Image (cartoon, rainbow, N blue to C red):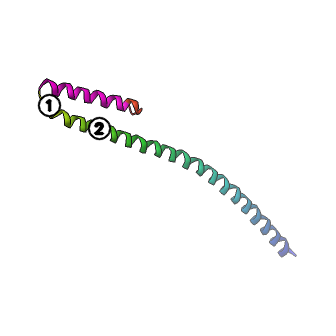
Amino acid sequence: MKMPKLLAGVSIMAAALGGMYAIAATTAASMAGGFATEESSSHTRNVAFSTEVQRVSTEHKAARAQCELASGKERKVCNARARIEEIRAFRGANVF
């Protein structure tokens, strides 16, 4: 007679543990989904930031290359304008 009671007790424990596992798995999955969304959003912002920095830097280098063709005061003015445009581009892109 003790065997059916033992089997019933084990079955109840297994069902209870299975239920707790299901609840824990659901909770963990929903939490992980929230973390993945935040991390994904952060990654997207980082990629956009890097792309914008690279674009602005490339434009600045091209402008500076044009300044190399000038000489004297014209070169200084050209470099200053290139730097001002670089700063404006960075600020417009919310990089600074």
Q: What residue type is labelled 2?
A: Glu
Residue that label 2 marks: 59
**Residue 93 sits in which quadrant?**
top left
60 and 12: which is toward the camera: 60
Name above or below for residue 75 compared with residue 23: above
Q: Residue at x 38, y 43 (%)?
A: 51
Percent position (x, y) of residue 68? 15, 34
Q: How many callouts does the rendering have?
A: 2
Sequence-first tag of 2 and 1: 2
Q: Are marks 2 and 1 in contact (CB under 8 Å)?
A: no
Q: Which of marks 2 and 1 is in front?
A: 1
**Image: magenta residue range:** 72-90
Residue that label 1 marks: 70
Instruction: Judge left or right: residue 85 versus residue 95.
Output: left
Q: Is residue 2 part of the magenta span, yes or no?
A: no
Q: Distance between the residues labelled 2 and 1?
A: 18 Å
- For the C terminus, the image quarter is top left
Instruction: Judge left or right: residue 37 versus residue 44.
Output: right
The kind of secondary structure element at disc 2 is helix
Percent position (x, y) of residue 81? 25, 27
